[in-house]
Amino acid sequence: MPTNSQEAVQTIREMRPMIDPDEDFHTIVAAEESIAASHAKRKEQLEEAHAKLKALSRALEAARVSAARPPSVPSAGAHAALVDELDSSKLSLMKAITDAEGMIADREAELTRLKEEARKLEDYDPSLEHEKELDSLTIRLQLYKGLGFEPVAEAKSGDIAKMLVRSRSGDLHSVDLANEAPPNQITDLLWKLLAS
């Protein structure tokens, strides 16, 4: 008949094929590379937008200077239309730059989150955590048994239904834990039986 620790070891062995930190690591590396490529592309677009903005700013300044020139320069209406068009283009580019910077900030935040997640995945060992839980449960059960308390689990559910109490006089008492009594009454009864 297998014990709880044998079942736990068997469960851990069955779970081992499902746990693949290398696959998770490669997924994170691929995501980081994708984000880096996206970041480089956004940076290039941002630099292009800045270059266009500078060119448009120079064109706007040239248009303003030419407005003060002799009558050989285009009419005031044509000049105003050109200035409006350039201003509109400048605003569109500024909005595009702002949007691109926002996207870069989002990608950087996502990259930071993914790096933190990767670090946690590298540090986390589920089998070690499970072993710690099993060890602490075993120690607690041994302590209870050493005091004179022995839990009895139901065969189907595995829930603790009764507690066997070995009193100091050597008598063995059975206490039903499934009754409706308050927990503090059951605790008092267990200690009273132990001391008898």
Image (cartoon, rainbow, N blue to C red):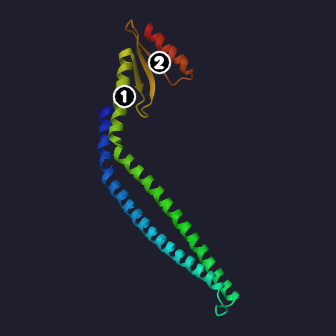
* Residue 138 placement (x, y as % from top left): 34, 27
107 to 146, vertically: above or below: below
Q: Which residue extends farthest front? A: 70
* Residue 137 placement (x, y as % from top left): 37, 28
Quarter of the image with the N terminus is: top left
105 to 122, vertically: above or below: below
Asked whether residue 20 is in view, the answer is: no
Task: Please state if 149 lies on the left or on the right of 187 as rendered.
Answer: left
Label 1 vs 2, first from the N-terminus:
1
Give me the residue at 53% from left, 78% from top: 55
- Give residue 136's mark: 1
Pointer 2: residues within 10 angstroms few (<14), some, or many (20+)? Answer: some
Kind of element beneath mark 2: strand
Reading the image, the residue beneath label 2 is: 175
Give me the residue at 31% from left, 33% from top: 5
Alpha carbons under labels 1 and 2: distance apart: 25 Å
Relative to the observer, which residue lies in front, 142 or 78? Answer: 78
Asked whether residue 99 is in view, the answer is: yes
